[in-house]
Amino acid sequence: MTSAAPRRVLLLRCPDWLADPDREQEAAARGFEPVLGIVAEFCPQAEVLRPGLVAFAARGPARYFGGEATLAARLAEAISLRGISCQAGVADGLFAADLAAQSGPAGLLIPPGETPQFLAGLPVAALRCAELLFGTGGIPELTELLPRLGIRMLGEFAALPAAEAGSRFGTQGTIAHRLARGLDPRPLAPNPPRLDLSVEHSFDPPADQSEPVVFTAKALADAMHAKLAARGLACVRVQVQVLCSGGQELSRLWRHDGLLTALAVAERVRWQLDGWRAGAGDDQDDGSGSSYGGHEETGGITLLRLTPDQLVRATGHQLSLWGDAVVSDRVARAAIRVQAMLGHAAVTRPVLSGGRIPAEQVLLAPFGDAGTPLRPVDQPWPGQIPAPAPATVYSEPHPASITDSAGRVVSVSGRAQLSAPPAWLSAGRGPALAVTCWAGPWPVTERWWDPQRIRRQARFQLVTGDGSAWLAVLQDGQWLIEARYD
């Protein structure tokens, strides 16, 4: 038995079908098909519990149609136009949604978080609905036994300890106790889309490198999104399936907190191939990230298939005034093409990160990757240099020499006192440049509790006579140039 936290569920009951239990099931299913067609216009994936009873997760469609109440009203109206009476119930969980649908001629909406209170006021006979919803036997006998024991309301039954309900009434008592508390024994199992919206590409000869597969995934994702857009749909979960010449198959579902763009799909294909390479333990990778780990047992990739697994109504995307979204998509296409030719790490983008020195505050992540910062950005980071940030940050600080007007090396005491104002700066083997103005020092001591990693620095901002601005640091008696202001 699967346990799942309650989720917002919209359930439709059509009494005309449910009132005749002797109706032939195949004929009932055919007659219920127009109702399912209407439901599919509001939510592409719904679970048909039986002819006359259908449910789906309400969160996504409700956000698109302006709320749960509006969604339920519009859906019931569309069905009633076909001459079919229906009741709509919305609640936390499938069981409560069914009871809410039966609470009135048009159904009922139970606000989020109020499902336990709603159930508490119902008689234990309401548990009989669980047999129709979940196929659980033995519930009717339990609903006859509980009133004889003085338990007449669901709230009274839910107040019993769960362990005692299970030990006294067995498995059916455990299920009934969960239902009384608003917890379903299983989550919704929506039917997959009826239309074949998958896209695929065959590789002949088989692809031994991951880069052509990722590049193809981007093109396939574009084609898949075109299919979805033509039907007013969008994808939040996609199935990536890879077949190898050795007969091995790799399939995985990928979900995104927003809509899966073509670039996001290509990114997940790369993650999947990289994970397969790591799982195969291939020691032939040259570090370029271009090999997916194919070997004699698996061979190269012969087929890549993308299948939209979870669909929602497309809400559209408003372009900005100057068309920035179009420009961004062109940049993404160009970056993917360069990565396909030169490798995944050939195109990078900056990601802000936390830190006190400029080299720590920017992370260069391969284009298309999430680029998780190494350190949180929203921390105070005392000791970091004030704005503005330098434009050019050296990966390795350049050695430098900063002297005073007498030619002596400028030093900083433990109390951040200068030995003399900076007068000359020489970066590397370059000529000495006169310092026209400067700011600092900004002292910082990092990891003072770790003798092996402690670092004491004093930073300066300097402007030289040629108009250049520099970020210099004095560490362990040595001057270094960390960055340059362009």
Image (cartoon, grey):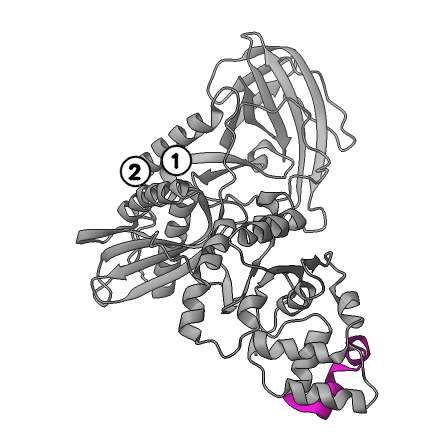
Apparent side of residue 382 relative to residue 192 in the rendered image (left or right): right
Examine the rendering and report whether any part of residue 396 can be seen: no
Identify which residue is drawn at 55% across, 11% down: 433
Q: Determine which residue is flagged by label 1.
A: 347
Q: Indicate whether 320 appears above or below 251.
A: above
Q: Which of the two residues, 183 or 339, is positioned nearer the viewer here?
A: 183
The amino acid pointed to by label 1 is Val
Q: Where on the picture, by quarter, is residue 97?
A: bottom right
Residue 92, horizontal then vertical, whole percent: 67, 62
Regarding mark 2 in the picture, which secondary structure is present there? helix
Q: Are marks 1 and 2 in contact (CB under 8 Å)?
A: yes
Identify which residue is drawn at 62% across, 77% down: 130
Q: Residue 160 lies in magenta, yes or no?
A: yes
Q: Determine which residue is flagged by label 2.
A: 342
Of the image marks 1 and 2, the number of the one nearer the N terminus: 2
Q: Indicate whether 157 appears above or below 481.
A: below
Residue 245, horizontal then vertical, whole percent: 20, 62
For the record, the magenta segment spans: 154-171
Q: Indicate whether 157 appears above or below 70.
A: below
Residue 486, horizontal then vertical, whole percent: 53, 17
**Circle 1 Cα neighbour tier, 10 Å, few/some/many (<14 / 14–19 / ≥20):** some
Q: Indicate whether 177 appears above or below 46.
A: below
**Circle 2 Cα neighbour tier, 10 Å, few/some/many (<14 / 14–19 / ≥20):** some
Q: Which mark is residue 156?
A: none
Residue 134, horizontal then vertical, whole percent: 57, 76
Apparent side of residue 374 relative to residue 235 in the rendered image (left or right): right
Quadrant holding the N terminus: bottom right
Regarding mark 1 in the picture, which secondary structure is present there? loop
The amino acid pointed to by label 2 is Leu
Q: Which of the two residues, 331 or 46, is positioned nearer the viewer here?
A: 46
Q: CA distance from mark 1 to mark 2?
A: 9 Å
Q: Where on the picture, by quarter, is residue 137?
A: bottom right
